[in-house]
Image (cartoon, helix red, strand yellow):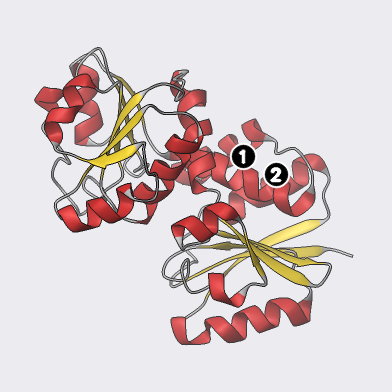
Amino acid sequence: MTRLAAVIGDPARHSLSPALHNAAFQAVGADWVYVAFDVAPDALERCIDAVRVLNVGGLSVTMPHKSAVLGLCDHQSPDALALGAANCVVANDNGTLTAHNTDGDGFVRGVEHDTGFDVAGSSVVVLGAGGAARAVIVALANHGASEVVVVNRSPERAAEAAALAPNVARVGDQSAIEKASLVVNATPIGMAGRDGLPCSTDLLGANHTVVDLIYAPRTTAWLQAASQNGATTANGLSMLVFQAATQFTLWTGHEAPIETMFAAVASQLAE
């Protein structure tokens, strides 16, 4: 009777998700187990066929499959459709597969959890225009942000991302940070091996909440400088946990044990 859930990606075996979800399943007494599968792009369709055949209960989807998996599912949530990407599949719900994107919801919940910041009515600058940035932009608009300024090296990419939230998002430059209350780094700059700063830290101060979606390292050079300037800061760990918590509830119907999930991730990172 045990249900199976898994993360699929190329690669996927480095993922923190198995530790996070297995701890959550145990905490609520759910008879589920979660594993990681490395799935090459040319094997994705066969993987999804196997999900149907084996009655797998749910999937987390990571790079490079977030876009391709959409067309292999029977249904798509509005956010997944808008973003053209899914990070979660609710599998074998009356024989069907439904694609979801929980990244944006995870971001908003994570920021509120870490800093108490209320997105509604806020002016936000998002640095970057890739998949993570787009999920954040849509979520900010859905949660009532008054303005989202997208800053990216490629104006064309920025315009595509801003178009996902018409009447709320626009393309801009770093000067928009002065009037913003929330600044989000959704670029990979600052990850291990990706040294640099996504924007000038001189622009960040006590009137800002600053969030870096990177969680390894836990404190990037950009976050450290923002904190020294008086800004309220948070990394991307809570986004990871809360996007997974939404997946957990979609699959099982149980409320996610948030503190258990945080503890599992912290233990895994410590190792």
Q: Residue at x 48, y 56 (%)?
A: 82
Element type at marker 1?
A: helix
Left/right placement of residue 72 relative to residue 129 reads: right
Left/right placement of residue 152 relative to residue 260 reads: left
The quarter holding residue 205 reads top left
Q: Is residue 150 above or below residue 161?
A: above
Closer-to-camera residue (59/78): 78
Q: Quadrant of the N terminus?
A: bottom right
Dot 2, how many residues are within 10 Å of its Cα: few (below 14), some (14-19), or many (20+)? many
Estimate the x, y position of residue 22 in percent, counting from the top left. Answer: 68, 51
Instruction: Tally the numbered discs.
Output: 2
Q: Are marks 1 and 2 in contact (CB under 8 Å)?
A: yes
Q: Which residue is mark 2?
A: 24
Residue projecting furthest to the right: 1
Q: Which residue is mark 1?
A: 261
Left/right placement of residue 55 relative to residue 234 reads: right
* Mark nearer the N terminus (1 vs 2): 2
The quarter holding residue 105 reads top right
Q: Is residue 152 above or below residue 46?
A: above
Element type at marker 2?
A: helix
Estimate the x, y position of residue 140 in percent, counting from the top left. Answer: 43, 35
Q: Amino acid at mark 1?
A: Met
Left/right placement of residue 186 relative to residue 64 reads: left
Dot 1, how many residues are within 10 Å of its Cα: few (below 14), some (14-19), or many (20+)? many
